[in-house]
Structures are given as C-alpha cells and as structure tokens.
Image (cartoon, rainbow, N blue to C red):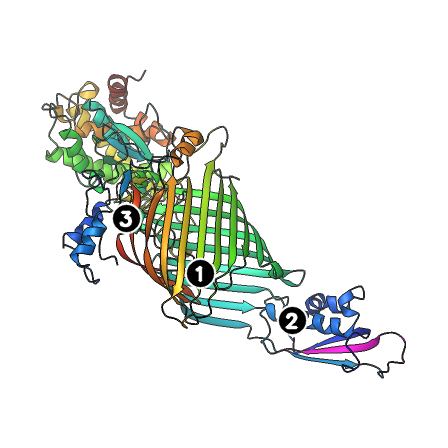
C-alpha cells in the first residue's frame, strides 16, 4: 500500500533497502496508490540518512558454507556420519565416491519444498548470513535424477562409472525405491495412522506431517499396503541385487561392471546401510553373503570403517 | 425514611432472587453473601446498604448470565418506627432474567495488521455457577485457521477472579516476512484476577503447545529451512497490566503498563526466560476546549534468554524470537522489517527496544468530539540477536550507533474497535538489509507505538 518503496540495492549502495521493493519504483509492479510527485519522491529517496552495518544473526541462523550442505533427517542417529535413512545415506556415500567435500545439517521433511529429504543447499561464496534475497541459495530437491546429476556435476572426473542414464541403472534405482524403501519404512517407524483418523485430518494434534519422517507420506503409503507383501517384495529385491552384483564381478567389483563406483552402487549401498540398522535387515541381508561382503568392503574402503 | 436521613441503622434479613432458575442457589448465596454479612460495615446503615446492593447488582451483571435489566426491591419486614430500638429489618428482592444459555454469533474482527471472520458459540452458566464454555472458529488474512475451546469459571463467586482452561489449534501465515506458516496446537490453563478499582489485571497461566514451522515458500532462506520443525513449549507465564488510559484507541490521558514474564522448560527442550514490557503515557499538553493537543509516548522492550537443560543450552527458536517492524510498532519499516535477516526472511532477535512519540491534534477547531486526529510521529527501534559473544556482546551491539529511526506525519481515526492510521514517513536511520517502508502506509490495529 505504499506508493514509494526503496530502490537501492542492498549490497551496491550506501543506502540499503530490500530488493523486493525495487520493483515498484521501476514500474514493474503497479500500485493502486497514485505516484508521488517527482520532487517529493526525490526527497524521500534520500532516506535513510544513516545506514549501519547489518544486524548480527542469532546463534541458530544457518551460516553459509563453502561446500554443499545435505539436509538429512534429524529423526535417526548417524553412524560414522551416515544417516540411517537410505534416501540420505545413498547421496552421502555418493559424495564420498566422488571425493566431493560436503556438509550435513539435521532437518525435518518440512525443510524441503517437496516434503522429502534430503535436499542440497549449494555452496556459498559468502561468509556471513546474506541480507539480500538474491544471495539466498535455492535448494536442490530429490526429484527424478536431479540430485544425482547435481552431485555428479561437482566432480567431472568420474568417467569410468556407469552413466546415470543407463536403463539398467534406472531399473535398479526403481527397484530400490519401490521395493526396499517401503520395507525400510515399516521396519523403522511405527504405524503413523492415528487411533482416530478424523483427528489427524481435521485437528492436527499429532506432529505435523512435515515435521517427522515417521509421519511422512512414504511411511503412510507403506503402511497402507500389506506388510507381508512389502517384506516379501524386499526379499525379492535383495535377491535381484545380489544377482546383479554376481553378474558384475562379485563383491570385489562394482554394479554393472563399472570401473568406479557410480549411482547404482551408491543407491544399493544406501539401502543396505539402512536395512542393516534393523534386526530384520541384518537377518535378511545376512542371508545374501555376497551383498554383505560388498557392503562391508565399501564401508572399509570409502568410510574407513573397521 | 429518606427524609429523616439515610444513616439510620438497618439490617438486611433476607435476599430473594427471582428468575435465576438455572443458577445454583449456592452460587447466588456466595455472590450475595456480602449483603448478609453482619460484620460488613457497609450494610449497617441504609445508605451503606443501598450502595452495597448496587455493587452486588453490578456484580451479578458482570457474570454475563443475566440480562442487563435487573429489578431491585427493598422492603421493611416490620413496622418502621424511629422509636424502635435497634436496626430496621429489611428484605431485598432482586429480579433477574437469565440470558439465553446458548448463543451463536458470526462476525468480523480487526486486530493488529489483520482482519478476520469468525463463528463463535457460547454456552453460558453451564454448571449453574456462571461457568462459560465457548468455541470459536475463525479465519483471517494472516491467521489461516483458528479453533479455540475455552472454559471459564468464577472463583469464589466473583466475576473478577476467573479460572480458565482452553484448547486451541491455529495456523498463522508468516509468509510475508519469513516464508513460512506457523501451526500451534495446545492447551492453556490459568487464573485471572481483575482489580477494576485500580484498573489492574493479573494473569497467571501455564501453556503446553506444539509449534510447527511448516509450509515453507519455495524461496525460503536457509535459516528458515533449518528451523522448519516441531518444537514443544511448556511455559509458565505471568501478565500484569495496569491501564488507566481514557480511550485506548486514541488516549488523551492515562498510562498503560503491561509486563509479561515467561519461563519455559518443563518436560521439553525449549528452555528460556522471556520478558516483555509495554508502556504508554498520554497527556493533553494543550487542554484547549476547541483545539486540544495530545502527546503520547510509548516504550517497549523485551529479552529472550535461553538457559541450559541437561547441561546443554539450546539457542533460541524462530518461533520464540521477537519480530519487529510494521505500522503497529515501528512505523517506517515493513512488517518484520527490523532486526536480523537471512535473505528476504526476518529471522528474529533475542532482545529489542522501541520508543515512540506522537503529537495529535484535531483537524479543525471544535472537532475534538470526532475521533480523527492529525499526527506528528517519531519511532525508534532496535532488535538484536545473541550470537557467540553472548550477552556482553549483545549489550555492546545494542549501543552500537543509533537505533533504527523513522519519522513522519499522519491521520489517525480512533474507532472503538480498532485504530486506523494513514501515515507518511521516512526511515532516517537503518541497518543494512532492514526492510524500509517509505512514503504512505496504512495501519490498522488495536495497539500502536
């Protein structure tokens, strides 16, 4: 409702105002309010007369980092810095495969535009919390192959891994997402369906859906299916993964015969890592020794696990 | 009797209340016990007794369970003669009509920077002791949805001593200054003591609520993303208010002092002490009957101090930190425009101070009856955060230069339900990144600096 808004750039001028207000003076945003006469406008534009340095951010403010930051779930403990959520662990190990430095930040699904973790905040050149909107990093969300592509782009030296667009890789990723992830959800979280579903829908008395991974849509979907069928599907998927591995040279090799670990290896390792943190997973994955040896080998070589 | 003087001794022997069919006799007995109290000096004389009955009738009206028209009849129970030794025996008969037990209303409200519509249901005198159960559902420009169930009950049959319990669920949009919605669900219980003679209110309450930072904008800052989560607040709060202003929307005399002290940390990870003070002083500096000029000064401040739980001090949460700026507190800055920022988002501060001064005068002579005033105003404010340097660094930061300052002129309309301001102002001093509001600005609210 203001007729005049500040126009100066936050960073470029001695007079610091917000970026969003510059549009009104440039004529892009039309206000219902009549414009001020030019002399008055020129007078107003001289303010503020004194501009001090920006305010210090609070302790909890997110400090910009010079490496990409992976927002991973805060609901599960870390082991060797690796999340127990397969969807987070697979990207973490991929960073390690590519030797790309990164940092992690505990978060909830609410932090993500798609309510799914992880997301990546790109690295920042700024050393302080930005006061300008144009320096706010845009999160990269896990839609389709976007995160894989982004992480790969951070290290272009990986030429010997199986390409992401390989149909076999796509099939393996789909296998993990559709068969292993629901099983992991059921094995890790209790049924989020409330005693009275009406309350969940109309009076959000429980934790909001974006605030806890255990209350997220994938977990709800997993519980909407028959648990025995979900777990049977996971057994079948593990069998298929071991088969893929044996055809790729066994536990000492990489999936699909790659000379370097790639996206498929990261995805499988992430899901095995997640499953190995629950009793059922230890038992069922343990019945596939080739897969276990491979998982242990990656842990030793990449994460320096003992 | 009146001709002979009102100070002759009397004794009220009985009170009969007609029409209170749904009200417990025990409650009415307690509410009127002061009249039959033989030790009450106010009931010893006819004049005193009339005053006491008047106060009792007002008290019954204050419960809001009877219609405003209350009949009163005082009669002598024996032959009146000044020759009779001892007090004259009197009987009082109070005729009341109970209000409808259930009321449903719909309406619109104006709050600070917000308009809303609501549906409200009230169940009066639920248990026969002036207890009230009410339910409200509302939606507004900032509050997307709000549901509230409140139960209040008088304590010791006094309308000025209330106990209350409420359950609430609300979702508020903070998208315009911090790219998120805040959802809250919880319960609150407490006691409220009013002292009408001193225009003072005391409220002690306990709140247990879950806050969710959710529904982030696609371009939300990293700090807001990192704080997108649930947190549970378990807090004891005390609010003390003294308000002697003659007309709060456009005061010409009187003072306001409101202090809020909160200590949080039982059973949850959110541990802090939070204190706020809000004061206002109004004085007519030129008491001219045709052209009065009024001066109003305001000062507000607050601090939020986390304390350790299990040896760990968690930094303050976004949901707890103060947000400053906007036409109802520091004019000349946008809503949430002052203080620390991350990109376009206000991320709040841990302590603040604001000062405001305004001079109001009528637009024309002989116009003082109409609540429209011209205004000269000046506002100053500072919102700072505690960083790694702790409180010492924060106190030093507060003294770092002038506070952010804005000044201007405006028109003020003081409607009984809200105050409307059309101002023209410029920020004179600011911090880099603070969001300014130059030129015209419209403010609607109930509390202004």
Q: Residue furthest top?
A: A306
Is B329 in front, or is A43? A43
Which mark is first along the chain, 3 or 1?
1
Q: Chain of mark 2?
A: B
How far separated are the C-alphas under marks 2 and 3?
57 Å
Q: Secondary structure at mark 3?
A: loop
Q: Nearer the viewer, mark 2 or mark 3?
A: 3
Q: Nearer the viewer, mark 1 or mark 2?
A: 1
Instruction: Residue B84: say if magenta.
Output: yes
Q: Is residue A245 left or right of residue A209?
A: left
Residue that numbered label 2 is attached to? B23
Q: Is residue A145 left or right of residue A179?
A: left
Q: Is residue A9 left or right of residue A59?
A: left
Q: Secondary structure at mark 1?
A: strand
Which residues fall within the magenta stretch?
B81-96
Q: Chain of mark 1?
A: B
Is B11 in front, or is B266? B11
Mark 1 burial class by Cα count in 10 Å: few <14, some 14-19, many 20+: many
Instruction: Residue B402: say if magenta.
Output: no
Q: Secondary structure at mark 2?
A: loop
Residue that numbered label 1 is attached to? B294
Q: Is the C-beta separation of discs 1 and 2 under 8 Å?
A: no
Please count the marks in the image.
3
Residue that numbered label 3 is attached to? B436
Is A101 in front, or is B143? B143
């Amino acid at each position: 409702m203001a007729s005049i808004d500040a126009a100066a750039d936050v960073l470029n001028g001695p007079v610091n105002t917000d970026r969003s207000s510059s549009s009104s003076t440039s004529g892009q945003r039309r206000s219902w309010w009549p414009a001020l006469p030019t002399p008055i406008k020129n007078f107003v534009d001289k303010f503020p007369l004194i501009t001090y340095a920006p305010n210090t951010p609070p302790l909890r403010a997110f400090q910009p980092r010079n490496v990409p930051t992976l927002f991973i779930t805060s609901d599960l403990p870390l082991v060797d810095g690796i999340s127990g959520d397969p969807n987070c662990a697979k990207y973490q190990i991929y960073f390690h495969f590519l030797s790309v430095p990164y940092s992690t930040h505990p978060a909830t699904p609410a932090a993500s535009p798609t309510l799914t973790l992880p997301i990546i905040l790109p690295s920042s050149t700024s050393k302080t919390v930005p006061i300008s909107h144009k320096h706010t990093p845009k999160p990269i969300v896990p839609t389709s192959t976007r995160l894989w592509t982004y992480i790969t782009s951070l290290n272009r030296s990986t030429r010997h891994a199986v390409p992401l667009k390989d149909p076999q890789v796509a099939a393996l990723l789909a296998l993990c997402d559709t068969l292993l992830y629901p099983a992991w959800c059921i094995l890790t979280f209790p049924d989020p369906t409330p005693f009275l579903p009406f309350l969940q829908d109309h009076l959000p008395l429980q934790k909001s859906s974006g605030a806890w991974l255990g209350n997220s849509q994938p977990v709800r979907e997993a519980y909407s299916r028959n648990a025995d069928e979900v777990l049977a599907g996971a057994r079948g998927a593990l069998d298929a993964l071991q088969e893929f591995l044996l055809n790729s040279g066994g536990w000492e090799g990489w999936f699909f015969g790659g000379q370097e670990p790639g996206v498929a290896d990261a995805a499988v390792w992430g899901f095995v890592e997640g499953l190995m943190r629950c009793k059922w997973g230890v038992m069922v994955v343990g019945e596939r020794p080739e897969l276990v040896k491979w998982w242990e080998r990656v842990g030793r070589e990449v994460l320096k696990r003992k | 009797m009146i001709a002979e003087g009102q100070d002759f001794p009397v004794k009220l022997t009985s009170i009969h209340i007609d029409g209170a069919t749904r009200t417990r006799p025990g409650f009415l007995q307690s509410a009127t016990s002061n009249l039959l109290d033989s030790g009450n000096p106010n009931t010893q004389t006819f004049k005193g007794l009339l005053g006491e009955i008047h106060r009792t009738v007002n008290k019954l009206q204050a419960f809001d369970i009877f219609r405003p028209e209350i009949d009163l009849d005082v009669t002598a129970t024996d032959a009146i003669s000044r020759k009779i030794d001892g007090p004259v025996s009197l009987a009082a008969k109070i005729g009341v009509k109970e209000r409808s037990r259930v009321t449903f209303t719909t309406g619109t409200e104006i709050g600070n920077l917000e308009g809303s519509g609501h549906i409200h249901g009230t169940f009066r005198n639920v248990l026969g002791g002036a207890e009230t159960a009410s339910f409200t559902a509302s939606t507004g420009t900032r509050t997307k949805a709000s549901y509230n169930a409140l139960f209040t009950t008088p304590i010791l049959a006094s309308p000025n001593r209330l106990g209350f319990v409420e359950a609430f669920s609300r979702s508020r949009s903070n998208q315009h200054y911090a790219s998120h919605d805040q959802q809250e669900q919880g319960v609150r219980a407490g006691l409220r003591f009013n002292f009408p003679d001193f225009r003072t209110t005391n409220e002690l309450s306990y709140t247990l609520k879950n806050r969710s930072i959710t529904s982030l904008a696609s371009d939300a800052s990293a700090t807001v993303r990192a704080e997108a989560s649930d947190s549970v607040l378990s807090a004891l709060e005390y609010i003390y208010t003294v308000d002697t202003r003659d007309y709060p929307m456009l005061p010409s005399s009187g003072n306001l002092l409101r202090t809020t002290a909160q200590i949080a940390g039982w059973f949850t990870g959110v541990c802090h002490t939070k204190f706020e003070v809000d004061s206002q002083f109004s004085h007519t500096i030129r008491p001219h009957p045709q052209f009065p000029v009024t001066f109003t000064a305001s000062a507000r401040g607050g601090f939020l101090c986390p304390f350790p739980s299990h040896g760990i001090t968690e930094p303050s949460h976004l949901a707890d930190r103060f947000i400053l700026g906007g036409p109802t507190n520091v004019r000349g800055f946008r809503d949430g425009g002052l203080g620390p920022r991350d990109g376009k988002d206000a991320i709040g501060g841990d302590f603040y101070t604001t000062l405001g001064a305004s001079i109001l005068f009528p637009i024309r002579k002989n116009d003082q009856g109409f609540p429209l005033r011209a205004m000269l105003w000046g506002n100053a404010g500072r919102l700072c955060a505690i960083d790694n340097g702790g409180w010492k660094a924060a106190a030093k930061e507060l003294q770092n230069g002038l506070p952010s300052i804005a000044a201007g002129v405006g028109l003020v309309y003081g409607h009984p339900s809200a105050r409307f301001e059309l101002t023209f102002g410029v920020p004179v001093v600011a911090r880099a990144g603070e969001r300014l509001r130059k030129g015209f600005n419209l403010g609607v609210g109930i509390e202004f600096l």
